[in-house]
Image: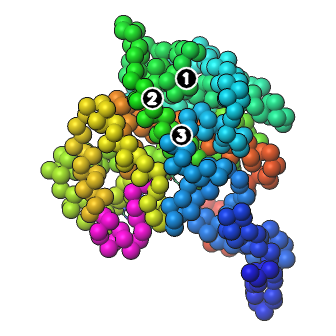
Amino acid sequence: MAEDAKLKIDGADYEFPLITGTEKEIAIDIGSLRGVTKGVTTLDPGFKNTASCESAITFLDGEEGILRYRGYAIEDLADKASFLEVVYLLIFGELPTVDELDKFHSDIKDESHVDEDVKKILGGFPKSAHPMGVLSSLTSALTAFNPTAVNVDSEEDMYNAIIKLLGKFPVLVAWTMRTKMSQPLDYGSNNLGYVENLHKMMFSRPNKDYNVDPQVIEALDKLLILHADHEQNCSTSTVRMVGSSQAGLFASISAGISALWGPLHGGANQAVIDMLEAIKTDGGDTKKYMAKAKDKEDPFRLMGFGHRVYKNFDPRAKIIKKAADDVLELMGVEDEVLDIAKGLEKEALEDSYFVDRKLYPNVDFYSGIIYRALGIPVEMFTVMFAMGRVPGWIAQWREMRQRKEPIGRPRQVYIGETHREFKEIKER
Ligand code: SDX
């Protein structure tokens, strides 16, 4: 392979080093570009061709449909690991031993209380407030109640901030849902597993014993694993950007939640169900919606389809699609929209518009069907995505801080007015 990348601008020749990652990905290191060319930069809206960082956390191969967390295949982790093991793996880089996992969980339990005054903030939202907006606000508010978690220069301070977030975030998720549903808040129980405790705080009822089928917890655990990290997606890049100014962990994660909220990103799982319900109401006419998705004049997109990186099946979608059948059978639920979804998938994968653009179902296409079967309200679907993604955001924020990455500050190409003289208002 060539040693350097060569560039010719206005007759001048420049060379830039090539960087090769452990999976043989190649990048041109343009760190000196603006300096040696006296001002030339690169333009790449959406960063489709730009690596923002070097990272050792998650590897994607979009052409082959490969996803690995710290080198472990997503299929193995979803099948054999617990969500808490994956949380530990993403953040600290290794699968934990029994003792390491026990201590990790014990430390998290010690931080699983939320200041009672958080309820005053929660109670201030109208019932119509979208849970993602509530969750982002409550997560940012954690800074006010845990001020020591802001300046995290030492490993110990960083660990403590991480443990606080992992302990309190499930409470915020559950309290956000129960407040919206006008249900009393549940404080959880330290005798339960991490995901089971989340489920209890979400679904317990004060007037009846809490019992849950272990297979329900297993399905939720698997869904959270599948959402745990995905390299430099929109919300993770947001967390790294905000964290690069040395804003605290909670503020950085709060920004990530806002980015994930968008319908082109994590909000797609809610948009998919809304779309499938609209098709069902419309008599199941999938061909009409396929035509809308292909019509350039129509802003409608087939939600849950397409991906910036995957130009093959999203491996998570494959796993979730299978799990959807299992969970619906387990819950004894007949959901007509699952059949509509499978019909849409079949039609799209036989349609040249989708095939030519390599548009396949992504993680959001089937996940909402499982969330609904588990009794989770549709407006909470993206909150569940955020619950799964928190360990990935933490791991990426920690890596950025440990590598002492510079503050994010892109350049631009100015296309506005050149200099002009000021005019007094009576002259305009
Ligand atoms: C997530 O980045 C991540 O890793 C994200 C994520 C994660 O885990 O963090 O995987 C989670 O966000 C999954 C994606 C969820 N979003 C959706 O399902 C929304 C629907 N999908 C699209 O809006 C779109 O596919 C994106 C946003 C996901 C990707 O958009 P890109 O990479 O910017 O691609 P594009 O918009 O340039 O589309 C390329 C072509 C265009 O047609 P042409 O102009 O070439 O003719 O494909 C078309 C698009 O119009 N297209 C679609 C489509 N997605 C792309 N046409 C119809 N329906 C779609 N869903």
Magenta span includes 357: yes
Residue 177 falls in which quadrant of the image? top left
Q: Position of residue 247 (x, y in %)?
A: 73, 39
Q: Residue furthest bottom?
A: 11
Element under disc 3: helix
Q: Residue furthest left?
A: 283
Q: Name the side, left or right, on which 277 lies relative to 304.
A: left
Label 2, residues with CA under 10 Å away: few <14, some 14-19, many ≥20: some
Q: Residue at x 32, y 65 (%)?
A: 349
- Magenta stretch bounds: 348-363
Q: Residue at x 37, y 47 (%)?
A: 322
Q: Determine which of the numbered discs, if any, sits on residue 193 in the image.
A: 1
**Above or below: residue 412 compared with residue 246:** below
Label 3, residues with CA under 10 Å away: few <14, some 14-19, many ≥20: few
**Above or below: residue 41 compared with residue 317:** below
The residue under label 2 is 217
Label 1, residues with CA under 10 Å away: few <14, some 14-19, many ≥20: some
Q: Which badge, 1 or 3, is on the more N-terminal residue?
A: 3
Q: Residue at x 69, y 60 (%)?
A: 52
The span from disc 3 to disc 2 (Cα, nearest Å) is 14 Å
